[in-house]
Image (cartoon, rainbow, N blue to C red):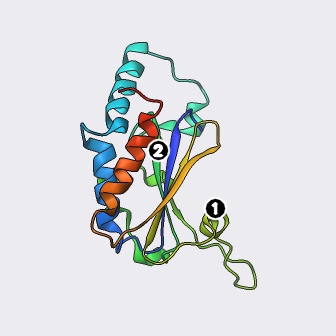
Amino acid sequence: MLGQFRMFFFVHDVQAASAFLSTVTDHIGSSEESVLYRASRLADHSYATLNTLTPESAEYMQPQRYTAASRLYTPALVTTAPKDSVEIAHLPPLLQKSRWAFYLDDIADAAGNQHSATQAWLGGLEDSEVAVTIVRPDGYVGGISRWDFRAQAAGQQAAVWLDEYFGGFIEA
């Protein structure tokens, strides 16, 4: 887990939800108003000044795959969209940086029955919904919320929700 938070964005149609995803990820990835952005900058500075040695296991684990966006958190995208309908290049920049945390939720058994993580974690998702799940560094779920991405201010509401969650225990 690398001692990071994970933010899973669950969505059926990535293209339809692109404005929502862009609003939220632009906020947490580059806005001075974002708790996560400010805390990530401080964490990067701290890691740079600590000058920690790279463990041998990093050669095999390749942690840089999961710390490309931030050493504090990894944003992840989970979609039930068909593989040929979405490209990493079409994702917002923050999610492009986290390309190793881009998951297709399209597992089917031999009989063709779908067994989705979206169904297991969230009990399903409406076509116009995006769900955000925060997983703490200890592996426990810290928060789950859903938004109708068609709503005008849904992306801003999600950004505020993330700031309120992380602002409850991170001072940046």
**Residue 138 rendering spot, x and y as whole percentages:** 64, 36
Q: Report the quarter where the C terminus lies.
A: top left
**Label 2, on which residue?**
74
Q: Position of residue 14 (x, y in %)?
A: 40, 70
Residue at label 1?
Answer: 121
Q: Amino acid at mark 2?
A: Thr
Where is residue 158 shown, x and y percent of the image? 38, 55
Closer to the camera: disc 2 or disc 1?
A: 1
- In the rendered image, the quadrant that contains the N terminus is top right
Q: Which residue is at a point 42% across and 75% down the rendered structure image? A: 128
Q: Is residue 126 above or below residue 24?
A: below
Quadrant location of residue 88?
bottom left
Is disc 2 in contact with disc 1, using a CB cutoff of under 8 Å?
A: no
Horizontal side, residue 31 vs residue 80: left or right: left
Q: Is residue 97 visible?
A: no
Asked whether the viewer can see residue 116, the reply is: yes
Q: CA distance from mark 2 to mark 1?
A: 18 Å
Q: Residues within 10 Å of mark 1 (few under 14, many from 20)?
A: few
Could you say whether the residue bearing mark 2 is in a helix, strand or loop? strand
Q: Amino acid at mark 1?
A: Trp
For the residue pair 59 and 117, the one nearer the viewer reads as 117
- Asked which secondary structure carries label 1, the reply is helix
Against 54, residue 60 (above or below) is below
Residue ranking furthest to the right: 110
Residue 157's x, y, as percent? 34, 56
Q: Nearer the viewer, residue 118 or 143?
A: 143
